[in-house]
Amino acid sequence: MISFRTLLLGDGTANRVVPPSGFTAALTVVSSAAMAFLAVFAIALGLAASELATRWENELSGTATVRIPASGGEEMVQTEAVLTALRQTPGIAAVRVIEDHEQIALLAPWFGEGVPLDKLRLPTLIEVTETEIGPELDGLRLRLSAEAPGAVYDTHSRWRIPLVEAASRLRFLGVLSLCLIATVTAVTVALAAAASLAANGQVIDVLRLIGARDSWIAAAFTRRFTIRAFLGALGGVVLAMVTVAAIPGGVEAGVLSGLGFDGVEWLLPLLVPVLAAGLAFAATWVAARRRLSGVE
Amino acid sequence: MIELDSVKMSFGDRTLFQDVTLLLPEGSFHFLTGPSGAGKTTLLRLCSLQLRANHGRVRLLGQDTRGLDRDAIASFRRRIGVVHQDSRFVDHLTVAENVTLPLAVSGRSSDDPGDLSELMGWVGLGGVADRYPPELSGGERQRAALARAVILSPEIVLADEPTGNVDWEMSLKLLDLLIELNRLGKTVLCATHDLNLIRQAKSRIPARVLRIRDQGVSAGAEL
């Protein structure tokens, strides 16, 4: 059996047995580069989606808003009653009435600056911070409706859960994309290797005739295709990393603001050439052994 | 050394030969002759383990070759040098690299340039070592193939019409090389149509002739 070291490094003649050029070489390098480029973006997408899902989950879970509708002068009394009820309820850590200037800031995107709050019949909003366990919601809602008819205890779940689910699906999409990219890479390299093996039938016949073992021949082809896939993928990764780094960040960038890498995350794309080489190694090895089984 | 015992070889409905029993002793020189299509190449391919007999047993170098796995066949082939009429090479490697290829595939060193140049000189190819196979003439190709076949010092040399594509002068040179190998103790089996070549050899060494005819092989055939 051929040693792993020989398989990776080969020797002078073995490295030259496989013709150095041809369309299969270009196909392997270009397809590996393209797939690696896409893989880096899939990783970035997956990371961004993951971060988004975590952020939404963390920032919005454990909080709620109580909305007390304007009711012609009874708001103050009802608000005090609700605040008292909330403070007495187990599972609630803190409550706070949202101030007028905060409401103005919330409405500014729709109505502009300087909204005349005194002329609008706006509900009173209370921000609630829940403990880790949280309150018993059915009982709390019943009590609030008794203290302030029309008061709503909103856990944000109506829009928070779909958002978190969407982010999770986006993350799944990133993983699925990586799997598809890996599959396409493996198939492309396997096809290129099979084409190369078929085109070099004479070389294989000669090698078998002079006593080359299947593992030696397979290793010669596998080594060549593994190196090509690695170098192609490395080029694709470098290009993709430069592109990702050039994507503008910040709020102005909108949905693209989270697409990128932070700190050690920049090391993740460097795994792509290694994985591409591994895939090429396995695909070429299988293709070579299959081809050789038909040669005496 | 080479022993065929009740060997039958057929392709589909066509039987090339059957019940062939032969014994080629170590250090012998045999010619294999017969009409085109009689099965000379097939017999040589059986002896180089490129084909497996439908029936019977092929023993090489004292070992039954039935049931050998692919790695064992590869190991056997390093002990058998083969020269074909249309010897094939790895065209993008130089002649020297092609000749030393058996060393590379068997994991042996080919670092000693003295050995290689001596071998290339022996086959008369000293000046073409750095050229590529497509640049060689027919005779040069055959001599390069012979050099490649013997670089591992095999015990058996099989030559399939080695003089088929070369002129008489070159045929004699190739015969000289085969005879020299035989004198070094190699067992030589050479398939050829060329009766003049056989007569030339028989005048110099005790070569024997095997003739394939009527699905059989007769030993000691008259020319």
Image (cartoon, grey):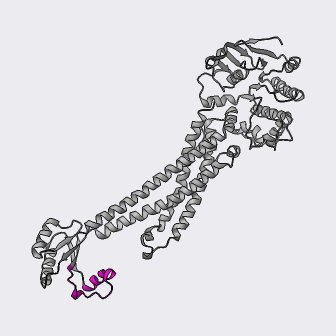
| Residue A132 rendering spot, x and y as whole percentages | 24, 67
Asked if the stretch drawn in magenta spans residue A183, the answer is no
Going by the image, does A190 lie left or right of A81? right
Q: Is A18 placed left or right of A96 in the picture?
A: right
Q: Main secondary structure of the magenta part?
A: helix
Residue A288 percent location from the top left of the image: 59, 40
**Vertical arrangement, residue A22 with respect to residue A33, above or below:** above
Q: Nearer the viewer, residue A128 or A123?
A: A123
Q: Report which quarter residue A96 is drawn in.
A: bottom left
**Image quadrant for the N terminus of chain B?**
top right
Residue located 51% across and 59% down the image: A38
Write down the region rendered in magenta. Answer: A100-124
- Residue A261 placement, left or right of A159: right
Counting from the top left corner in percent of width and height, residue B112 is at 78, 42
Residue B68 found in image quarter: top right
Q: Is residue A180 visible?
A: yes
Could you tell me residue B191's position as x and y percent? Answer: 77, 22
Which of these two is toward me, A95 or B211?
B211
